[in-house]
Amino acid sequence: MRAASKDRTTIVDVQSPLPPLEVLKGISFWLEERGWKKNGGNVEEKLLIFSGNVASSAFLVIFLSCLGGVGSACLGLVLIQLYPSLSWWPLLLAAIGAPLAGIIYRIKSKREESLEVKLLSSDLSDMSILRIKAHRDELIAIQLELSESLELSSENSLLSSPI
């Protein structure tokens, strides 16, 4: 459960041959379409900040609930072997462990995330260099959906990352 709700914020530098204003408008529009909200920024630092809420995955809630139930049932079986006088009562741990695992995951995975876009190149430059700090999945979505239209490229591909 800890890995499922782990923060996977990553920083990546992205280049584009397009002018900075065009690239920033394209990224801003795309993020707002996906439900991100502008949360301010800093003109001197050339920084845009977006925020959005992350919802838990229904599949993972069900999967982790099943794993929690099986694990609790196994613990119950071990307790029955150690203390036979308890009869079948330790198996009720499965009824507690299954929903508890799903509830814990839902609580830990629901959080507000931020996405920062910082312009590293000059405003008047013909080429754009951006530093994007965001969740790894969002960076992969940017790479998949915007790399062609905004001609974005980076040194390392997030799609081949082992993490």
Image: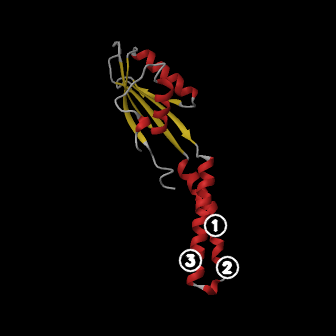
- In the image: residue 146, left or right of residue 83: left
Q: Residue furthest front?
A: 160
Q: Crowding near pointer 1: few (<14 within 10 Å), some, many (20+)?
A: some
Of mark 3 and mark 2, the one earlier in the sequence is 3
Q: Secondary structure at mark 3?
A: helix
Residue receiving disc 2? 88
Name the residue nearer the viewer: 144 or 10: 144
| Outermost residue toward the bottom in this view | 85
Q: Are marks 1 and 2 in contact (CB under 8 Å)?
A: no
Which of the labelled discs sits on residue 82, or is there none? none
Q: What is the crowding at mark 2: few (fewer than 14 residues within 10 Å), some, or many (at least 20)?
A: few
Q: Can you tell which mark lies on residue 96?
A: 1
- Compared to residue 53, the image places residue 150 above or below, namely above
1 or 2: mark nearer the eye: 2
Q: Amino acid at mark 3?
A: Val
Task: Give the mark nearest the N terminus, 1 or 2.
Answer: 2
Which percent across, then down, holds residue 109?
A: 54, 49
Q: Is residue 7 above or below residue 40?
A: below
Considering only vertical position in the picture, is 100 above or below 122?
A: below
> Given the image, on which type of amino acid does mark 1 rest?
Ile
Q: How is the image coloured?
A: secondary structure
Q: Which mark is residue 78?
A: 3
The number of callouts visible is: 3
Do residues under tags 1 and 3 come within 8 Å of each other at their CB atoms? no
Residue pictured at 33% horizontal, 13% vertical: 125
Q: Nearer the viewer, residue 51 or 142?
A: 142
Q: Are marks 3 and 2 in contact (CB under 8 Å)?
A: no
Residue 81: image x %, image y %?
Answer: 58, 82
Could you tell me how far apart the alpha carbons at marks 1 and 3 are, in whole angstroms?
A: 16 Å
Instruction: Tell me the residue at 67%/79% (across/down).
Output: 88
Image height of 13 relative to 9, above or below: above
Within the image, what quadrant is residue 70 found in?
bottom right
